[in-house]
Amino acid sequence: MTNAIEVSQLTKVYPTGKGKASLRAVDHISFTVPQGQVFGFLGPNGAGKTTTIRMLTGLARPTEGNASILGYDLATEITRIKKAIGVVPETSNLYDELSARDNLIFMGQLYGVPRPERGQRADTLLRRFRLWEKRDTPFAQLSKGMKRALTVAAALVHQPQLLFLDEPTTGLDVMSARNLRQMIMDLRDTGVTVFLTTHYLEEAERLCDRIAILVKGHIVALDTVDGLKAAAQGTTAIEVTLADAHNRITTQRIEGDDVAAALRAALAQANERQLLAINTVRPTLEEVFVQLTGLSAEVMLAEKGNQQAVIRESGR
Amino acid sequence: MWRDDLRCIFYIALKDLRAYYLKPPNISWGMLFPFALILAFAIRQPGDIRDLVPGLLGMTVLFATTSMEAIVITFERRIGALERLMLAPISLPALLLGKVLGGMVFGLLTVLAVLVIATVGLGLWGANWLLLILALILSAAAFSSLGAFVSVVVREVFEAQTLANLFRFPMVFLCGIFVPLAAMPGLLQAVAYALPLTYAVGAIQQAMGGPGVLGSLFDLLALALFALIFFAMAIRILARRLG
């Protein structure tokens, strides 16, 4: 399998004011993304996720290191790269004054989509993203979810081989976020490589073939979801649920190096309580994340101001 | 790659014209303000109104090109839409050229309307049309590049308007429209020759049979030079800003 992205020792240092230390946003990161995979880039605010995307899409010049995107060298073939990739930035940034359809047509014009195909592709995308009814509505008058969907559609007009998605579901309602996730899975099925940054760990767990966790500009872990969880097996736990004579239910969590011995001890202490259930608790991606970053997922989401969105989602 | 650049220049200009320029308030601002100034001057100092037409045309190009050009880039940078253009397969100079071309076309369309009114209304048929067209195109290029320069220097839209006025208003009063350059003190003359509107008005005056101060070729070259300098400075600043 060939790699869609190859990154080696990529570094970005931002100069700060006189007398202040420069800001090392990304520090010698290296990774590869095989073609046709969904690659997740996770990390708290300020970890360097967006800076990495900005470098890989030509919006910021790396201070050190090199990268190749779809076989093109980042330093010397940026225009070829830009032609072959699609980018969905963190903010929905199309043109307020243009209609939904005209925004897509304009993207087709910029990327050299042949004139007869522009309208056809725009209409197909408008239908696919359920925006057909709003095709003549100016971007400014669309709802937040529709703006996000149109921004994703705009990145697909020229049928890119590689799609960068920076926090694509941030601020979306449950249905819009679900539609977008389904669209990401559909893209993967058609062979498009997806580079995804997200604050939603559940989303990353569901969508990504491989995940890199970035902390303070460094990649601290890179593996499949199962691989990351396996690496965190030390925290595998067993939950024992017991009921006493008055039907009071208690759940006891047992974890440690010798879980079997701990379980025997717990059952011995159960006395006359009724054993209701014994469950193996596998570590979630959230627990892996907490272990690696020292941050809780709640803190990460609160930083982003999206706590409410997540609560809504988890209640689905 | 140059084909990609040419295509993008055209479509960026077209998009800007549709999205920002061709709106009634912009058209009226480009025409009404110079008309009002000229009218006020003509009432205060009656004379042959035809002498004021070159100044009117010069001011119309200046205000029409810079009124929106100065804020379009600042606005798009603020809402993130400029980043959308930078993600496209286009070089930075071509991106900025698309922006400048949009302002130029709008300025030329506006001045064309004024020119038709002035020509028909005042019977100014005997102009050197080739020189006039060249003068107006190069003036539009210089002023639109000035607008682009202003818009990349500032960070906020209101700052763009303030900075644009800092350039525009001294030009209006120093560039030989209301007071002949020869009648100005030496220091003000030196300032006038450092401003592009002086050369725009000079070239238009000569195209319309007036005396001018410098040769028309010199005026045209000066306008082209101003366009290049403003454009180069705008690219340099924008590239540095975008890091």
Image (tube, rainbow, N blue to C red):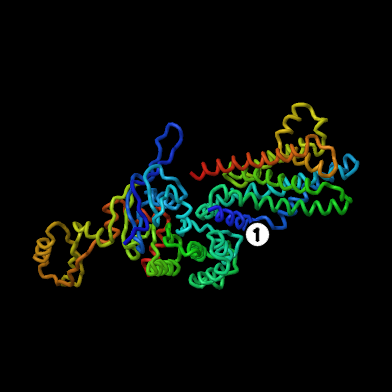
Image coordinates for residue B12, horizontal then vertical, percent: 60, 55
**Residue at position x 84%, y 43% from top?**
B52
Taking A189 as reference, is B108 above or below it?
A: above
Q: Disc 1 is attached to a residue of which chain? A: B
User: Does A67 sit left or right of A254 as displayed?
Assistant: right
User: Does B200 sit left or right of A131 as displayed?
Assistant: right
Q: Quadrant of the N terminus of chain A?
A: bottom left
Residue at label 1? B18
The image quadrant that residue B145 belongs to is top right
Residue count near mark 1 (Cα–Cα under 10 Å), binned few <14, some 14–19, many ≥20 = some
User: Does A201 sit left or right of B25 as displayed?
Assistant: left
**Residue at position x 75%, y 45% from top?**
B135
Return the residue nearer the eye: A30 or A170.
A30
Image coordinates for residue B177, horizontal then vertical, percent: 80, 39
* Three-letter amino acid code of the residue under disc 1: Arg
User: Does A295 sit left or right of B231 as displayed?
Assistant: left
Image coordinates for residue A255, horizontal then vertical, percent: 17, 59
**Residue at position x 87%, y 54% from top?**
B120
Residue B159 visible to an observer of this rendering:
no
Residue A6 visible to an observer of this rendering:
yes
Q: Quadrant of the C terminus of chain A?
A: bottom left
Return the residue nearer the eye: A203 or A28.
A28
